[in-house]
Every structure is written in structure tokens, then in C-alpha cells.
Image (cartoon, grey):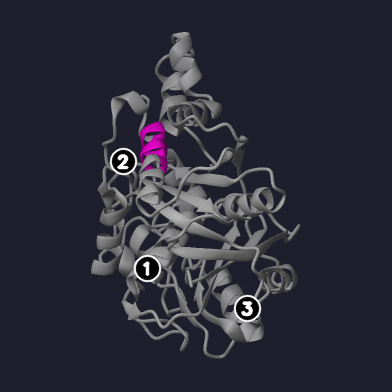
């Protein structure tokens, strides 16, 4: 097995369950979804819908919006957690922020309410560099800081970028954050028109990855922070490697021949120095759509072991868009640490590999897949900390 991986030694989270890592863990292990009925988010914006939105909270000094407050709260919790687990920052700590749609609420207010007339300080709050700059200043970090964006695969892209930085000696450690608080009525409406978002059915019934009768996903929001280092004495999990590719096929659909998807998984295993038969779990992208179910089931059959089991936590946390894979990686890492995979309960017949409800971890390798809209394929390989 390749020894060039790194540890995930601190975790922070803000999700539809509320503010904090333990709130997320308690929510997913209880088996209840994070969504709630939100007014004005229905199919045509005219009624309530199930959406796993981040509730109000955080600190005013972290910025004027839920986005900035969530991003900094998740990062701060991860940094504090890593320190409690023995991490000491190196001289060059970099920051990677996975984000697709940033500050949606502030931009809407800028154009639709204020007609562009805002004080300079408020305008600077709209810039994607601002929450990053304030976080770097708070902790005195001086490594590189940049955004990463690959649609729903952004979390995986961030981890693989962190690996490149660490492998290249550019940084000593990385603080990684993924933030997506874009489940506004306008965005939910357009995903509903695309035919992939379910707004009027209980999420655990509507979103059934790898099961009969699944009709799509519930929209979610999240900010997730993690500290990544080769020098941590007590990581939650190790990131061994991974890969990304692009279908170059369609703006929403997966190439049906699956050549690039399957190739991406094989390259991820090669990069991590593991074999398909070594993989114990596939922490799937699993949004409950027919094309993703087909793609990931095929990968499991052709690339992974016949003993590899599947699960997806999207029925619980919602589809958190640019932060989706980061939330799901955090759950997998916490699962290694606490000995439980908080898989949602099965509600219909489905793939025989699918886990049914919380399951004891029996060790072994996890592949975390993320298939971003537009053709972004990605797979990250995780292992227990030993």
C-alpha cells in the first residue's frame, strides 16, 4: 500500500442538522433526515418543500451571511479539533475552499434589493477571497489559499488538490473547507425543473439510492472543514489517493458507455496503491437518480470486490451540491473513528450490496465517489488510521 497518503486529523461541520460536528453525527446515526419544510421552495416557488437548509446561527464577526459564518465555523471547529488530537501547525499551512455558488443570499440582495448600491465594505463581503482572507488572518496561516470548483465533485477535488500540494512540498498542512449554502427558492426551482430534485415527498421515501422507486434527491446545504496533515498523531482516517476525469459528453448526463467513470475508479486505486478486492465499502455519490445508480453499480461489479458494500448518506443529509462529497467523507471518517457506518435504512428492494441502516465498521478501504454534473468523475480512497 502506498505510504504517500495523509491523515484527516480534525473535522468541523455545519449542516441541515445544525451547527457542529457532533450534531451531524447524532443526526445521521439516529437515521432521521436533516430536511425540513421550507416555505416558498416548492416546484414553482409557490409552496413549502423539503429542503435540508442550514439554520441561522454562527457569529456576527464571521461575516454578514450564513455562508461566511458557516464556512468559518466549520474551519474553526476542524482546526480546534485537530489541536485537541495532537496536531501542531507547520510553518506553511495552506487553505483550500471547495465552492460552486458562493454568497448566493448576498448577491441576490445586491442585485434585487439594493440595485448594486452598497458600501464598499459590504461589496467586499461578496468576494470569494474575503472569507478565506479573514480565516487566514485569524490563525496566522501563510501558505497558499485558493478556491476549488468541480460541481458536486468539488469536495473530492479539494482533497486531491491537497494531496498534490503535500506531495509537491508546497505546504506542510492543509485546512480544507467545502461550503454550499445555495438552496434558495430559485435554485431549488431549477433543479426541480431538471427532474432530479424531489420537493414534495419525505426525503427517506423519495431518495432511495440503489433501490426500486427512487425519484431523485432532496436539496441540502453544508459547510465542512478538515485539517489534512502527514504529521498528525491521531487522525480520523487516511486519504491514500484518488483520481479525477471528465466525460466530455453532456452538460448534465453521464456518458452511458461509462468508459471515463470506470477508468477514473481504476486510476484512483492505482494512485492509492490498492486493489479492487481490497475495497470494503463504496461510499457512493448515490443521489438516487437512475443514471448515477447504474454507473456506480456497474463500477462496483466491474472494478471492486464482490464483497464491497454500498451506502449513500444523501437521503439523510440531502444533496449538498458543492459540499456534498465533503460531508460524506466527514461521515465516513467519523465512522472509522466510532466504529459505525450510519447508512440510511433501506425502504425498498434494491442492490444486494446495499447496507441497510447503521452497520458496524469491520475495517478496510473505502472509496468515496462523486460524479459532478457536467461530466466530473472523481474517486478518493480512504482507510482507517492504522
Query: In this rendering, would 124 be left or right of 185?
Result: right
Would residue 186 be counted in the magenta stretch? Answer: no
Above or below: residue 347 compared with residue 232: below
Query: Separation of disc 1 and disc 2 at Cα?
Result: 39 Å
Q: Is residue 346 visible?
A: no
Q: Which is more foreground, mark 1 or mark 2?
A: 1
- Which region shows up in magenta? 67-75
Relative image position of residue 26 (x, y in whole percent): 25, 61
| Rendered image: mark on residue 299 | 3
Relative image position of residue 333 (x, y in whole percent): 43, 64
Q: Residue at x 48, y 26 (%)?
A: 137
| Rendered image: mark on residue 337 | 1
Would residue 71 be counted in the magenta stretch? Answer: yes
Q: Residue at x 30, y 64 (%)?
A: 28
Give the class, few, some or many, for how many residues have Cα within 10 Å of label 1's Cα (few <14, many ≥20).
some
Task: Describe the element under mark 1 as helix, strand or loop.
Answer: helix
Q: Residue at x 46, y 50 (%)?
A: 226
* Residue with the mark numbered 2: 40
Amino acid at each position: 500500500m502506498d505510504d504517500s497518503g495523509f491523515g484527516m486529523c480534525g473535522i468541523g461541520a455545519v449542516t441541515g442538522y445544525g451547527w457542529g460536528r457532533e450534531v451531524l453525527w447524532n443526526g445521521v446515526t439516529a437515521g432521521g433526515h436533516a430536511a425540513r419544510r421550507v416555505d416558498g421552495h416548492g416546484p414553482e416557488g409557490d409552496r413549502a418543500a423539503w429542503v435540508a437548509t442550514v439554520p441561522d446561527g454562527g457569529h456576527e464577526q464571521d461575516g454578514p451571511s450564513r455562508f461566511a459564518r458557516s464556512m468559518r465555523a466549520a474551519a474553526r471547529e476542524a482546526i480546534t479539533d485537530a489541536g485537541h488530537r495532537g496536531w501542531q501547525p507547520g510553518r506553511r499551512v495552506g487553505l483550500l475552499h471547495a465552492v460552486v455558488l458562493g454568497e448566493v443570499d448576498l448577491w441576490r440582495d445586491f442585485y434585487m434589493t439594493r440595485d448594486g448600491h452598497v458600501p464598499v465594505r459590504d461589496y467586499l463581503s461578496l468576494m470569494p477571497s474575503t472569507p478565506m482572507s479573514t480565516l487566514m488572518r485569524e490563525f496566522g496561516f501563510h501558505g497558499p489559499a485558493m478556491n476549488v470548483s468541480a460541481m458536486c465533485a468539488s469536495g473530492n477535488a479539494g482533497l486531491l488538490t491537497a494531496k498534490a500540494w503535500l506531495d509537491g512540498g508546497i505546504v506542510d498542512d492543509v485546512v480544507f473547507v467545502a461550503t454550499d449554502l445555495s438552496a434558495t427558492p430559485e435554485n431549488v426551482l431549477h433543479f426541480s425543473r431538471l427532474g432530479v430534485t424531489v420537493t414534495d415527498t419525505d426525503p427517506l421515501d423519495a431518495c432511495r439510492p440503489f433501490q426500486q422507486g427512487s425519484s431523485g434527491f432532496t436539496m441540502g446545504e453544508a459547510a465542512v472543514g478538515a485539517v489534512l496533515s502527514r504529521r498528525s498523531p491521531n487522525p480520523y482516517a487516511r486519504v491514500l489517493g484518488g483520481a479525477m476525469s471528465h466525460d466530455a459528453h453532456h452538460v448534465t448526463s453521464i456518458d452511458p458507455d461509462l468508459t471515463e467513470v470506470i477508468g477514473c475508479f481504476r486510476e484512483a486505486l492505482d494512485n492509492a496503491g490498492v486493489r479492487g478486492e481490497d475495497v470494503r465499502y463504496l461510499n457512493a455519490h448515490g443521489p438516487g437518480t437512475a443514471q448515477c445508480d447504474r454507473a456506480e453499480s456497474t463500477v462496483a461489479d466491474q472494478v471492486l470486490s464482490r464483497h464491497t458494500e454500498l451506502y449513500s448518506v444523501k437521503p439523510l443529509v440531502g444533496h449538498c451540491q458543492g459540499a456534498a462529497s465533503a460531508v460524506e467523507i466527514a461521515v465516513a471518517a467519523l465512522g472509522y473513528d466510532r466504529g459505525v457506518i450510519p447508512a440510511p435504512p433501506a425502504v425498498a428492494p434494491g442492490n444486494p450490496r446495499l447496507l441497510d441502516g447503521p452497520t458496524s465498521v469491520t475495517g478496510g478501504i473505502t472509496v468515496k465517489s462523486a460524479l459532478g454534473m457536467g461530466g466530473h468523475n472523481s474517486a478518493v480512497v480512504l482507510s482507517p488510521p492504522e
